[in-house]
Amino acid sequence: MLRTVTVRSAVNRVEKIGLTGLALAVVVLSGCRVDLATSVTVAENGSGTISVVVAADADAVRNAPELATSLNVDDLRAAGWTVDVQNPAANGGLSVVAARTFATVDEASLFLTQLSGDNGPLRNITLTRTGGVNDASYQFSGVGGLPKGLAGFADADALTALGEAPFAAALAEQGGVLGDVLGVSLALTLPGEPGEISQTTATITPRQADDTSTTFTWNIALDSSDSPLTAFTRDRDVSAMVAWYVARGLLVFMIVLVALAMAYIATVVYRRSRSTPAS
């Protein structure tokens, strides 16, 4: 556990703080273990939900009992996020749960990009959906990592208030690394079956026979490296596709029958008109 650095008043002066900045504030205030877990669930029509949990352990709460009241989440709520501060959480620590819905995969890409900004742990996020109603493909890509350390993890306002590395000296003094006090993960659930294993860099949750979606999970490395984040699924409703083709076939068959019936009726009328003796 790191000793707490004296930046509480600076954190309180941050008027606008994003979700990654919020996690930074928890780390700085408590000096203990903090985990940032992002979960994204996409429905078949491209809508879905994003949930972000910033969790500090019990040592953090004991080390900084004012932690919950020192966090500013007003701007998150104003931006459309629902925010729930749980103090204490089930494990005796503290957690901040932020969530929001999205209507399209384009919105999901936008909101995920806003989570980290240009230098945060999740960058260059793109989520696309192609295909039709009964046969669609989902493609996810991005970059994970924190090559700039906490300077990349914070947003601009947090950096202004806290400085480039608010507890780098304490971290170095303890001989620790950033990954010892901070964990970042991403879980993505997409409709359909996963592509080949070579098409993803994630751990895939084993699917049951009746599962209609696939969950990919990444634990983001917090060293100086960047890691590609990729995932692909294809969502095919075979029974619906067969039913559609059968319905189309029946429609064509009925049109042909009607056309044949009309031709037969026209032929009979013509023959009768030709065989009728003139008065």
Image: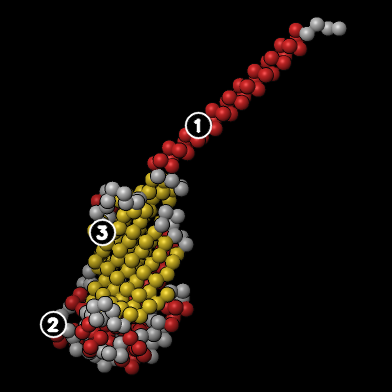
| Residue 85 figure quarter | bottom left
| Position above or below: 231 against 254 | below
Q: Label 3, on which residue?
A: 202
**Mark 2 touching mark 3, by CB under 8 A?**
no
Q: Position of residue 184 (x, y in %)?
A: 26, 71
Callout 1 amino acid: Gly
Q: Nearer the viewer, mark 2 or mark 3?
A: 3
Query: How packed is label 3: few (under 14 Cα within 10 Å), some, or many (20 or more)?
Result: many
Residue 251, above or below 101: above
Front of the two marks 2 and 1 = 1
Residue 232, visible in the rendered structure: no
Q: Residue 175 — which label?
A: 2
For marks 2 and 3 on the same chain, the one whose residue lies earlier in the sequence: 2
**What element does badge 1 sit on?**
helix
Report, in whole angstroms, how far the alpha carbon at label 1 lies from the one at label 3.
42 Å
Instruction: Bin the neighbour count of mark 2 within 10 Å (Cα to Cα): few under 14, some 14-19, many 20 and up.
Output: few
Of callouts 1 and 3, which one flags the residue occurring earlier in the amino acid sequence? 3
Amino acid bearing label 3: Ala
Q: Residue at x 61, y 26 (%)?
A: 258
